[in-house]
Image (cartoon, helix red, strand yellow):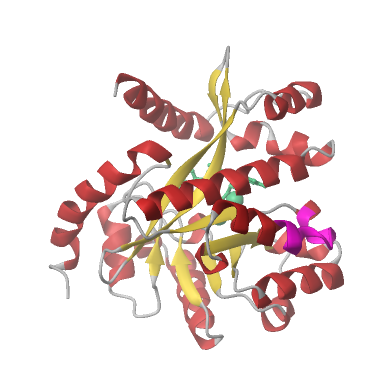
Amino acid sequence: PAQLRQILEAEQQGADDRARATRIQYGADEVEAAIANDELVNHYQPKVSVRSGEVVGVEALVRWQHPRDGLVYPDQFIAVAEQHGLIEGLTRQVLCGALRQCRQWHDRGLRLSVAVNLSMSSLVRLDFPEFVAAAAKNAGVDLSWLVLEVTESQLMHNPLTALDILTRLRLKNVTLSIDDFGTGHSSLSQLRDIPFNELKVDAGFVHNAVRDSARRAILEASLDMAHRLGMKSVAEGVENLADWQFLSRRHSCDIVQGYFISRPLPAESLNAWVADWDKRSTGLTGGRA
Ligand code: C2E
Ligand code: MG
Ligand code: MG
Ligand code: MG
């Protein structure tokens, strides 16, 4: 409990810091040691249905429990891991941890999907779909509970291989999600060619959309487009009641994620959070259907 409070304070502090200074970037050797020494932990941020308030899943977000510096955020080590060939090992650790955790939640009656963020490196490896299938089997989780999030820019480098890998994953019943939509070097034709199931509009178009007509235009067009392409739509960066209310009036928004609902949480606090959210969300949705 005291430790949990510390972690949540660190999440809060991390988010506050992010707006300010450019923080230190760790060296490749340090990141490599962190991976080898099991110092990375997954936190999980809830994704909820904006209509029913129901928690539909969580997104795994990696953190580094640094022995000296405390909780370190991905913007301080993911880029280094990508540049030094360490990201594939990191991704596989995060994925296996998320699947094991998913199994534990299911065993305790929490039927949640779990989303994992991919890097470009996974999208150039033809053995990746088989690795995913084996990891899920090992954890005892059906692949229909797994969501893989990719950004537009990760698809650009080797589009044909990425298409091949994502199609194989889709055929295994993995849910495919396009992340940070609107910010990458987008090629809209990829939305047509790749069998995405979910589109996540970047936080930059979501928070304060009610007061900013340019954001609102992009947000609404993206949500509508997702639906017209047969995808679920997700709004990231829901930070306050006004953001929530704005989206709950939009027929085109299915799922929301953001600090207003919850910060990313350590796995062990998910059960308690869900119980608390069930009470809080009744007031937001006007009771369950
Ligand atoms: P992302 O996948 O778009 O994840 C969402 C980020 O927005 C997370 O930051 C989350 O904590 C933050 N966020 C959540 N709610 C709000 C909100 O209401 N307002 C604002 N302003 N931000 C919010 P985080 O955890 O620092 O992760 C940053 C990025 O690092 C992620 O962006 C993702 O691209 C990357 N990342 C995180 N974990 C992994 C991982 O395991 N593997 C890879 N390859 N990348 C990861
Ligand atoms: Mg993501
Ligand atoms: Mg995102
Ligand atoms: Mg991002």
Q: Main secondary structure of the magenta part?
A: helix
Residue at image position (74%, 22%) is 33
Q: Is residue 4 above or below residue 198?
A: above
Q: Position of residue 283 (x, y in %)?
A: 13, 59
Q: Is residue 117 visible?
A: no
Q: Is residue 12 left or right of residue 76?
A: left
Residue 240 horizontal side relative to residue 140, left or right: left
Q: Is residue 156 above or below residue 25?
A: below
- Residue 85 in view of the camera: yes
Q: Quadrant of residue 287?
A: bottom left
Q: What residue is drawn where x is 79% and y is 37%?
A: 86
Q: Quadrant of the C terminus?
A: bottom left
Number of marks present in the image shown: 0
Up the image or down, 99 lies above or below 73; here it is below
Residue 39, x across and y down, in percent: 61, 25
Give the x, y percent position of residue 286.
13, 68
Q: Is 185 situated left or right of 267 in this image? A: right
Q: Residue at horizontal 40%, vertical 27%?
A: 7
Magenta residue check for 129: yes
Q: Which residues are magenta?
A: 122-131
In the rendered image, the quadrant that contains the N terminus is: top left
Using the image as rendered, state which of residue 194 and residue 250 is in the foreground: 194
Residue 65 is inside the magenta segment: no
Farthest residue, direction top: 68
Residue 282 falls in which quadrant of the image? bottom left
Residue 132 point in image, percent of width and height = 68, 58
Residue 165 is drawn in which quadrant? Answer: bottom right
